[in-house]
Image: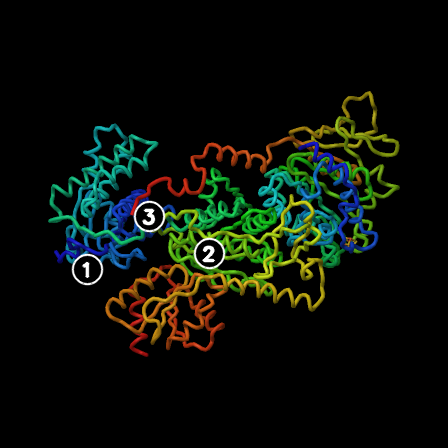
Amino acid sequence: MMEGVADKQAELTRQDFVSDQAVRWCPGCGDYMILANMQKAMTQMGTNKEDFLCVSGIGCSSRITYYLDTYGIHSIHGRALAVATGAKLANPDLNVWVFTGDGDCLAIGGNHFIHSCRRNINLNVVIFNNKVYGMTKGQSSPTTPAGIKTKTAPEGSIENTFNIGELAIGSGATFFARVPDNNHKLLEEVMLEANKHTGISVIEVLQNCVIFTDGIHELITGKETKDDNQVVCKHGEPLLFGKDRLYGLKLDGMKLKKVPYDENDTGFISHDMYDEDSAMHLALAKMEIPDLPVAMGIIRQAEKSNYANVLHQNIKRARELSEFKTVHDLFYSGNTWEV
Amino acid sequence: MAELALEKEMRKVVVRFSGDSGDGMQLTGDMFSQSSGQEGLDLTTTPDFPAEIRAPQGSIGGVSSFQIQIGGTEIYTPGDQVDVLVVMNPAALKANLDKLKPGGTIIADMDSFDRRNLKKAEYASDPLVDNTLDEYHVIKAPATSLTKSALKDLGLSNQAITRSKNMFALGIVAYIFSRPLAKVKKLIDNKFAKRPELAEANKLALEAGFNFSESTELFGASIVIPPAKLPKGTYRNIDGNTAVAWGFLAASENSGRKLSLCSYPITPASEILHELTARKDMGAIVFQAEDEIAAICAAIGASFSGNLSVTTTSGPGASLKSEAMGLALISEIPLVIVNVQRAGPSTGLPTKTEQSDLYQALYGRHGDAPMVVMAASSPDDCFRFSYEAAKIAMEHSTPVILLSDTYLASGTSPWRIPDMAELPEIKIPVFDRSPEEWEPYQRDPEYLSRYWKSPGDAGFEHRIGGLEKKENTGNLTYEPANHQKMTKIRAEKIERIAKKLPELETIGAQQGKLMVVGWGSTHGAINTAVTELLEDGEKSVGFAHFNYIQPLPANTEEIFGRYDQILVCEINNGQFVNYLRSIYPQFSYKQLNKIQGQPFFTSEIKAEIINRLTDL
Ligand code: SF4
C-alpha cells in the first residue's frame, strides 16, 4: 500500500496542483511565491493528490484554495481552522492545509487559532503576514506595527501587535516556523518539515503586499539588510548572522544579546528546536530589529499528543470494547418492556 | 377532609414528585415511569428543575419536581392538574399546591415538616396540622424516620440513609397503583448495578413505604388503570435529547456514513452532545468546539469530508451560527442544525421552553437563503425527525434545521423501538460516471441535489466555498444572470422536497367551522384538547399538526380551504401564524399564544376553541 502511494507520488509534478482558475493577485504580490512553492512542495509530501484538503478563510491569502487543484474549501472570514478541524477529525487520513492571513487568522479568527494550537491537531497552517488587510483595502490588522499609517489609522497605528510566533507557541503550538516570501528554498523546506510534523504546524510567511504595505518587511528581507537582520535557525547549530556570520546570540540574564561570535566560547546559543520547554523558542520568536535579528526557519518542533490521533484511538478502543455492535443493540439496552 | 378525587379504576392519573433538589425526585419519577411503562400504560413526563442552581436546602428556590401522566388511553401531555402530589418537604408543598386538583391526594414526608423547614418555606404554621389542606386528601407519612429504622442495620452513613427516603415515597405510590414490588426492585437493581449496597438500601426503603401503606390501610384498595392499547412491540422510555442523538446514529448506520457531531455546550441542548460523546462506542466522532461558530464550521468541514454532520445548539448559539449556515447553503452540502429552543431573546429564560426561534430558523440569514425547517412534536418522535432531518440533508445536499425545545428535550414518553428495516431508506444520489463527465455543481435532475464528492475520491478534486458559483461548473463568477439563476435553483431545490413529504393529516371534522393548527412540541396539548372536545360531541372542529415547516406539506392549502377559520396555537408571539399568513393570505387566521416559558395546558386550548366556536 505504501509502495502504491509512493508510485503515484513519483508521477506528480507541480502542474498537477495548478488549477484551471486564473490567478488574480496584484502583480508582484508575495502570494505568488507562496503558491508556487506550495505546489512544488506538494509533489514531495508522499500524499496522493486526492488526499489533500486545502482550507482557507477570507482575504487575499485565502484565494489560494482556488488556485490549488486539490479538494478545497474557501470558507468564511476567520473560520478556516474550524472548518479544517472538522474535516480532519472526520477523516484523519487527509493531509489538511490551511491558508490564512494576519487579519483572517488573528483578528476575526483569533479564537480558533489559539484553540487549534492548544489542541495540537494535525493541521498545517500557513499565515500570510502582510501586516494589513489587503482585500478590504488597507485597514490595520493585529500585526500592523505602531506608527504605520492605514485607512483606519491615518495618523499611524496606536495599537500593540501580536507576535505570531509568541502567540502560537504560547497557545501550545508544537511547530512554528517563520519564512520570508522571497526565500524559495527555505519556504519549500519548511513546508516539507511542517508536513512531516504530527501536530499543528504554524508557518508565518512575511509576505509583501505591493499595494498597501509595500516594503514593510524590507529591512528584514531586503538584499542589503537581510544578513544583519535575519538569523536562520538550524537545529544543532549556533545561531549565527550578520555579514560573514560574525555574530551570535548569548543569554544575558533572561535576555538574548547579540555578541561577536567566538567559536571557542561555549556560551553561545545553539538551536535546539526539539526542546520540550518553550522558553528559548519564545525568546527567539520574539526577537526584533534593530537590537536583535528576526528568527527564521523552524523555531520550534516539539512532540506532544495530537488531538485527532488520540480522539480516533479512543473511538477505536471504545468501539472494540463496546457491547453494541449495531444501533439495534443500543436501543435494546437498559430497561425495555413488551406490549 | 374533602372527597377523594381518586377512584378505584381510572383512565388516567397525574402524579407529581417534588422535593429538595437533593431528594432524588428525578430518579423517583424516572423509576415510576419505567414501572408504568412495564404495566402497559402510556405516559408522558416532564421534569421541573429548581430555578436556582445553588438554592439553599429546603428553600422554595431549591425545589425539584417531576410530573408524569399515566393512562390506559393515549397520553400526549404530562397533564394540566395533579391527582397525586408527593412532597418531601414544606417548600415542595408550597411550590406545588396550586397545581393540585381539588380533592387531590398529598403524600407528605411529615418528618420534614419541622420548625426549620417550615420557616424556610415561609409557613407561619404547619399546613399538615392547620386547615390549609382541608380540601385535599392528605397522607402523612413518616418517611424519614421509617426509612432510618428500616436501614439501621446496613451500616450506611446517615446521609446515605436519608437519601433513600425517596424510595420510601416510591413505595407508597407503587402501593397506590398496585405495582408488583418485585418488578420495581428489579429496576432498582438495574439502576444501582455497580453499587449493590445502595441497591439494598433503596429496596429496603421501597419495601418500608409499600408496607407502611398496606398496614395503615391508607386506601380501601389500590387504583387500577387498565393498560393502554399501544401498538405491539418492544418499548422503552426516552427523552427528546436522547431520541435526537439516537436518530442520528440510526441515520448514520443506515446511510453508511460516519457521524460527526460538532457542538458547543448550551442549555438545553447539551445532553445531545453528552449522549453522542458516550457513543464513541458506536463510532460517533464528537468534537466539543471552542465556540458556536467553530462548531458549525467544523461540521461543515466534516460534511465535506463525507460524514453525516450535525451541530446542536439553542437560540443564542443558532444566532452565532447563522453566517456559517449560509456557507453550507451556498456550498450545497448536507448538514443538520438542531436548535433545542429555549425562551429568549438573549439569555431570556434559559431553562424554560418556547417556540420563538421559528422566524430565526426561517429567515435568520443574510441573502436569499432558504433551508429546510422541521420540528419534532414529542420526546419519542424526536428520533423519527432527527433521522428524517439527516435523510433529507444527505439526499438533497442541503442544510436542515431541526427544531426541538426544552419541553421535548427533558420530557419523556414511551418509544416503540423500531426495526432498522422499517425506517425509510436513505438514498444519497450517486454519480457513477467518470470524473471527465462530472462537474462540481451538476445536479440530480429530479430534486436538483448536488452530488456529494469528498476528499479521497480521485479525479473529483474540486473547490467549494462562499462565493457565488457558476451553474454546473462551480467556477467563480459575478455574472448577473447566473446569480439570479442560482438563487432560483437554491429556492426551487427546497420547494421540490415537498414532493417527498407526508401529506398533512387532520383529525376531527374534515371540513367545517374551525381548523386548529399547531407545530412542533404543542402537539400533545392540542391533540388532547381537540380529542376531548370530539368525545364530548363537538362536530365542527378539525386539527392538523405541522412537523414540516419549510417546505410545507403539499396539501396544506387545500386542507385550509375547507374551514371557515384557522386557529394557530403556539408558544411564542405569533410566528407560525404570520408565516402562514404570508404564504396563504386568503384564509382567516386567529391565534392563541402563550409566552410564559411554559407549555400549553390542555384546558387553555379547549377554552380558546370553545371561545372561537361561539364567536363563529
Ligand atoms: S492587495 Fe496586497 S496582498 Fe492583496 S493581492 Fe494585492 S498585493 Fe497581494
Q: Closer to the camera, B270 or B473?
A: B473
Q: Which mark, by number, is residue B347?
A: 2
* Label 2 crowd bin: few (<14), some (14–19), many (20+), radius 10 Å: few
Chain ID, mark 2: B
Image quadrant where residue B158 sits:
top left
Relative vertical location of residue A316 with respect to residue B428 in this rendering, above or below: above
Relative vertical location of residue B14 with respect to residue A337 in this rendering, above or below: below
Horizontal relation, residue B535 to residue B330: left or right: left
Chain ID, mark 1: B
Horizontal relation, residue B359 to residue A30: left or right: left
What secondary structure is marked by label 2? loop
Please give the residue where the numbered disc 1 appears in the rendered image: B102
- What residue lies at 87% left-to-right and 42% top-to-bottom? A223
Taking the view exactly as shown, the residue that stands out farthest to the top is A264
Callout 1: CB less than 8 Å from ligand 1: no
Label 1 or label 3, whichever comes before in sequence order: 1
Residues indicated by labels 2 and 1 sit on the same polypeptide chain: yes
Question: Where does the image place residue B298, in percent across and percent down from the top left?
Answer: 58, 48
Q: Which mark, by number, is residue B233?
A: 3
* Label 3 crowd bin: few (<14), some (14–19), many (20+), radius 10 Å: few
Image quadrant where residue A310 sits:
top right
Q: Closer to the camera, B492 or A229?
A: B492
Q: Please state which of the two labelled residues, at mark 2 or mark 3, is closer to the viewer.
A: 3
What secondary structure is marked by label 3? loop
Image quadrant where residue A156 sits:
bottom right
One can see residue B114 in this view: no
Q: Give amino acid for label 1.
A: Pro
Label 2 or label 1, whichever comes before in sequence order: 1
Question: Where does the image place residue B364, in percent across and percent down from the top left?
Answer: 54, 62
Relative vertical location of residue A328 with respect to residue B546 in this rendering, above or below: above
Rendered-image quarter of ligand 1: bottom right
